[in-house]
Image (cartoon, helix red, strand yellow):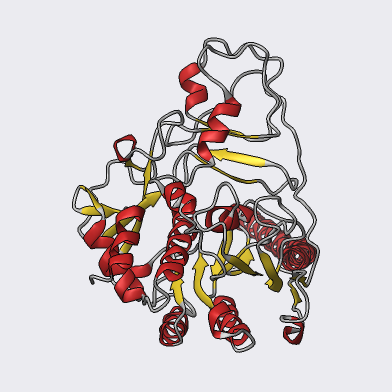
Amino acid sequence: MVFHHARKRTILYEHASVACFRTTKQTSRIKLYCLNWSIESVKRTHRRLRKRTIIILVISASILTAYTIFVISINWTMTASVNLDNLGLSSEPLIAYEMPAGHIDFRIPKSLPRANNSGVRDLRFFDLSTIDLSEQYDELMWSSFSSNTKWSDNLPVGFSPNQIMEIGKNPGLCVRELHARGITGQGVGVAIIDFNLLPGHEQYAERLRVYELYRSINKTAVMHSAVASIAVGKDTGVAPGAVLYYIATMYGTFLPPLQLVNYDNLVACIERVLEINTYLPDNEKIRVVSISKSFSESELGGRALRKVIERANESGVFVITCSPQENFGFQLMGIGRSPLDDPDDILSYTVSILNSGTYIPYNALLVPIDSRTTAGYTGESDYVFYRQGGYSWAAPWLAGMYALCVQVYPDITPELFIKLAFETGDYLNAGKIVNPVRLIERLEDGVF
């Protein structure tokens, strides 16, 4: 019996050992299978990731290539200059490139478009013919529009686009009184460095003498054709008798959504103006340059721009930018009026929409920038009324005023002009609104 039980236990042990061995072997197989599956899974995952990475890289490269082509295309520059040896040989303007007019793309809204943050609506290229505007007087009086704007037959009482447009052509502050006396800036050279110009516009075509392009990227004329009309326009300009020299350029490189500013172009254009002056007799030289752009010395090319402005000043050329404090110690700011108010009445004016809520400092000169009618860029007889202006409108206005002063007193300098402008101006806060009549009278009296 003892033997039998011992034998039975031995058999049980043997069975248990075999079962344990089998279990261990199966476990090893399972572990090996799991290891192999894990390795294969990792490999498959790696292949998928590698495939996805390649796809992402291809897509990214394609997007980057397309973006690069886009940036190159919008920054494709064009330079065209005239032969300066021909300056005195012909009475015809020297135009390096016949810039086409800008394209009009009419929009047909169901209601008046929204106002911007300043409360001004842009109706320049809108077809409003299907909208009842009879109850929209206040909204329309705070709108910019063009001679191309298509109006509804139902306009509010008292709102006349043609009347507002005509009033806005007046440069303001009794400048036309000086024109009536023959003070028009006759023969004074005025250069403008800005975006593309529509050279044939009726406001300044007869005053244009040279039109060049330097690294300009626009394919057509753009809205800054307005600056030429503000400076020398026959009806809209401060100095309708001045001679216009225009160089179209850009202020930097577009890298959407950013514009990378580089003032090397402006430096080259000012140097070109100084070169043009070497071809002109003393009584026909360019005396003032308008650049509708502010800058600071800390920006790329800013120091070189400040230095070339100083060099131009030493050569008898006053370069007016939107930040004259960088070279001449004063700020250039704007004033505005209601569209139907008298542009010649100083009481019509208050701080411009752009400067609304801003206290005008003691070193600020102010000129009209709001409610101005300027040359349009979509046709040679097109116009735009800008309810809200900007500093871009201030620089050419002041340049035109300087041209009037040069006609009256050819030996004037920027320093003397600035001094007299402040002494004869009218206060607005601590700043001074330019008073053209008193300024010219001081120059005529010769009391400085």
Q: Is residue 37 visible?
A: no
Residue 362 spot, x, y in % from top left: 20, 58
Eyeballing the image, is 129 above or below 48? above
The residue closer to the viewer here, 227 or 413, is 413
Please name the residue shown 28% across and 63% down the image.
442
Q: How many marks?
A: 0
Residue 155 spot, x, y in % from top left: 59, 14
Residue 330 spot, x, y in % from top left: 29, 66
Residue 342 spot, x, y in % from top left: 40, 33
- Occupied quadrant, residue 149: top right
- Occupied quadrant, residue 112: top right
The residue closer to the viewer here, 381 or 109, is 381
Please name the residue shown 34% across and 46% down the image.
355
Q: Is residue 74 left or right of residue 297?
A: right
Image quadrant holding the C terminus, namely bottom left
Please name the residue shown 62% across and 66% down the image.
244
Q: Is residue 226 visible?
A: yes
Please name the residue shown 47% across and 40% down the image.
388
Eyeballing the image, is 63 above or below 282? above
Eyeballing the image, is 203 above or below 332? above
Q: Is residue 362 left or right of residue 233?
A: left
